[in-house]
Image: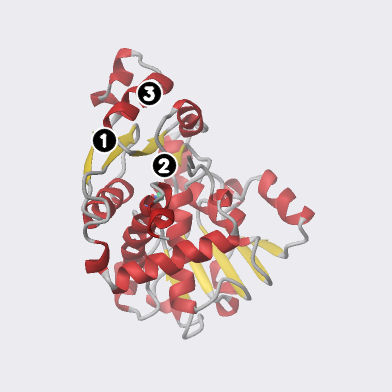
């Protein structure tokens, strides 16, 4: 049995197979409409989410399966003091696969160690968000045709943004990747990540101004300032509008630069940018459904069954 805790749990060859499957699912939805008939996905969300939870549910429904679960800790037995380990043992009796989001880093890992069904980490604190990374990689591969030879700007809250941390870890496995980290001093990418990049000799730059780097980018990954992970509101208010991507700034960027964002957006991308042909963040949310379909199918072992 296999779980998904980190994007590195899959080799790049396995990821290629997963993305091929996701593209095939996109092109031939009918073919997969009943492959999960009789199967159930439990979504155990101890932290708010719209996209991730609903895209997991949509993915399972598209495959013919059913969904059950809870969307906040307050409405689960966690509020009575139940441990994640006990909850997953019980959920293992009710469902075939589980997607879990938790504010504590490592909680889905604890669950996986006790589970009788595959567990997918749907975001653990400021740590990892592997299915968002799969979404991001599928989006880049589908729209750019490659995952190598890219200059990637990551902008915003690089300290607390778990999607950023997961994506960097996943991208370092591809050839000729250059990172430009664009953030205020207080929200710089954590040292453990820059240490890893130095060790692997992956080129990166840390800058404050977005405008200076825009002309060099194949891809701009914008992120929101993660209010819920700040210790005080004052710092959040000071930093929340540090970057606002608008039409005027975009004149500096290449015609084929992709603009991605894991969403939700707050102010960091002005709505006027939504109509720009480079704005791909809503399309990216759509890819999130296809990749989760492919993931559920694979973790349930249906790919092997078919083979
Ligand atoms: C991200 C998350 O939850 O970390 N959202 C998502 O999964 N689409 C990004 C965010 O909340 O800013």
Residue drawn where x is 59% and y is 46% of the image? 186
Whichever of callouts 2 and 3 sits on the residue coming sooner in the sequence is 3
Instruction: From the image, tell me which residue sits under label 2.
Output: 227
- Residue drawn where x is 34% and y is 73% of the image: 273
Say which mark, if any, is on residue 89. 3
The residue that appears at 47% across and 36% down in the rendered structure is 125
User: If you read the primary sequence from the N terminus, does the residue marked by circle 3 or circle 1 appear first?
Assistant: 1
Residue 286: x percent and y percent?
Answer: 31, 64
Q: Position of residue 110 (x, y in %)?
A: 50, 27
Q: Is 297 displayed left or right of 138 in the figure?
A: left
Residue 221 can be seen in this image: no
- Is the distance from the Cβ of mark 2 to the nearest ligand 1 atom less than 8 Å? no
Considering the numbered disc 1 on the image, is that residue within a helix, a strand or a loop?
loop
Q: Which residue position is annotated with label 1? A: 71
Q: CA distance from mark 3 to mark 1?
A: 18 Å
Residue 148 found in image quarter: bottom right
């Amino acid at each position: 049995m296999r779980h998904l805790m980190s994007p590195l749990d899959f080799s790049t060859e396995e990821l290629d197979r997963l993305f091929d499957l996701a593209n095939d699912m996109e092109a031939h939805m009918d073919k997969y409409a009943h492959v999960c008939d009789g199967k159930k996905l439990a979504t155990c969300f101890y932290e708010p989410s719209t996209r991730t939870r609903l895209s997991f549910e949509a993915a399972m429904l598209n495959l013919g399966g059913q969904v059950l679960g809870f969307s906040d800790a307050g409405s689960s037995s966690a509020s009575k003091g139940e441990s994640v380990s006990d909850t997953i043992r019980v959920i293992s009796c009710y469902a075939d696969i589980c997607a879990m989001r938790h504010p504590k880093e490592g909680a889905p890992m604890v669950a996986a160690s006790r589970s009788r069904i595959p567990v997918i980490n749907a975001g653990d604190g400021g740590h990892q968000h592997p299915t968002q990374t799969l979404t991001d990689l599928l989006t880049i591969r589908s729209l750019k045709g490659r995952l190598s030879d890219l200059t990637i700007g990551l902008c915003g809250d690089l300290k607390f943004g778990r999607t950023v941390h997961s994506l960097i870890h996943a991208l370092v496995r591809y050839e000729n990747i250059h990172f430009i980290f664009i953030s205020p001093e207080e929200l710089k990418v954590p040292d453990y990540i820059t240490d890893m990049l130095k060790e692997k000799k992956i080129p990166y730059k840390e800058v404050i101004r977005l405008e200076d780097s825009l002309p060099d980018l194949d891809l701009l990954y914008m992120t929101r300032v993660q209010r819920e992970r700040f210790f005080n509101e004052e710092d959040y208010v000071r930093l929340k509008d540090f970057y606002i991507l608008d039409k005027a700034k975009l004149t500096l960027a290449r015609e084929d630069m992709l603009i991605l964002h894991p969403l939700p957006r707050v102010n960091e991308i002005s709505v006027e940018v939504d109509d720009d042909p480079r704005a791909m963040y809503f399309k990216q949310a759509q890819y999130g459904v296809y990749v989760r379909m492919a993931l559920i199918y694979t973790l349930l072992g249906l790919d092997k069954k078919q083979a």
